[in-house]
Image: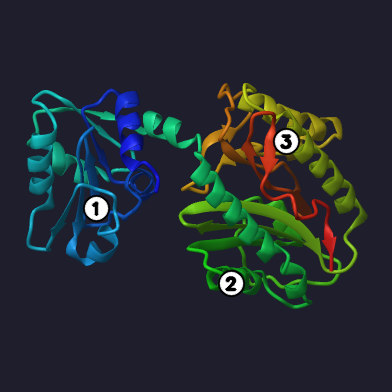
Amino acid sequence: MPAYRDRRIKVIGKAGVNALVIGYPANMRYLVGVGLETYERPCLLLANRDHAILLAPELEAERARKASVNDLILYGDDDNPYRIVAEALEDMVPRKGVVGFDGWMPLKHYIRIVENLDVRTVLVDEALYSVREVKDEEEIRILRRSADLLQEIFERIPGLLEKGISEADLAFELARIAAGRGAEDAHALVQFAENSAIPHHTYSARTLRQGELVLVDMVLSLNGYYSDITRMFSLGEPPREAVKIARIVGEANRAARLKASPGVKAGIVDEAARRVIDTAGYGDYFTHRTGHGLGLEVHERPFIAPGSSVVLSEGMVFTVEPGIYLTGRFGVRIEDDVVVTENGVEVLTGRLPRKIIAV
């Protein structure tokens, strides 16, 4: 069982606050093991060094009871949750004390909470993410399992590709398979031919024709932790230029993975991938950062971006996903998940070929 209290104390210490008010599910899950979404009814974690309280509407009782907290406060639709929060904080925080809020707190809830409190409020996102970005052994174990499951699903893609299948049909089928294998959340970007040149195209009714490229970028979560993979396929022999570009992107992926190690700046890793693509003459067509952190969110710190001064350390987990996109024609992206180790990185997604897989 993760040491949730230790995590809370570490964040409180880094942020220099007396207590936390957390309203974002990923942060909540990291600190107490359960993440509840705030809609019109607030779901909030209140914590100081000694005590943690989860406030939740009665309809969330079953999930809320699984949280690692000292007290669970359930409220009904005729209760005033803001008064409950204010009264609890008065007991947890000294007068004129400092309360840290995460930045995803809806403003309408924040105002109602603090309007009658004699405290100073600050954002604690920097402290939260600086703690969260270094994974412990249990988190890495779960991330490996998440990546293993996603690789199993990618290995089924060749058997699903056929003339006339639509991007939407393939995306839904992959999500269905993932759900049947125990994934909590799963969705895919499926991009055929010219749509693969649009990095964040999701899917459409566009159908697959012989000789066309297929880009699949899929994420899933297992026990709350996300894996994220992109691979290239084709129905029949792929275009010769696409094979050439896939080789360049694969080399850029490899260069970034080889450069990443403790003590190296994230911007240097990005530069390693970018240099390969620039040298090949396609620098203007690599239009995004090389990678992003993975964990309880699909995109979190660290970001492997141009000029980033973030220094990599053992336990950080992130994607390596260079790409080249030729508008109106096709795009190629190859994405792996890695964890920083003592001497470099462990590739969590190394089973899958990085070339275009012809079906």
89 or 109, nearer to the observer: 89
Report helix, strand or loop for mark 1: loop
Above or below residue 309? Residue 156 is: below
SS assignment at label 2: helix
- Residue 109, percent from left and from top: 20, 46
Q: Earlier in the sequence, mark 1 or mark 2?
A: 1
Look at mark 2 in the image and give the residue it sits on: 172
Q: CA distance from mark 2 to mark 3?
A: 31 Å
Residue underneath mark 3? 257
Q: Answer whether labels 3 and 1 touch (C-beta < 8 Å).
A: no
Which quadrant of the figure has residue 237?
bottom right
**What is the CA distance from the residue labelled 1 to the residue labelled 2?**
31 Å
For mark 1, what is the residue? 43
Badge 2: residue crowd in 10 Å (few <14, some 14–19, many ≥20) = some
Question: Would residue 329 appear left or right of 151 to someone viewing this image?
Answer: right
Image depth: mark 2 or mark 3 in front: 3
Residue positioned most to the front: 1
Three-letter code for the amino acid on which mark 3 is drawn: Arg
Residue 82 % position (x, y): 12, 47
Three-letter amino acid code of the residue under disc 1:
Cys
Q: Residue at x 30, y 39 (%)?
A: 5
In the shown orientation, is residue 140 left or right of residue 163? left
- Which residue: 56% across, 35% down? 316
Answer whether residue 307 is visible to the viewer in this image.
Answer: yes
**Image point (72%, 69%), residue name:** 156
Residue 231: image quadrant is bottom right
Q: Are marks 2 and 3 in contact (CB under 8 Å)?
A: no
Q: Is residue 326 left or right of residue 230?
A: right
**Measured along the vertical axis of the image, is residue 23 above or below residue 169?**
above
Which is more N-terminal, label 1 or label 3?
Answer: 1
* Amino acid tagged 2: Phe
Number of the label disc, if any, that sits on residue 256: none
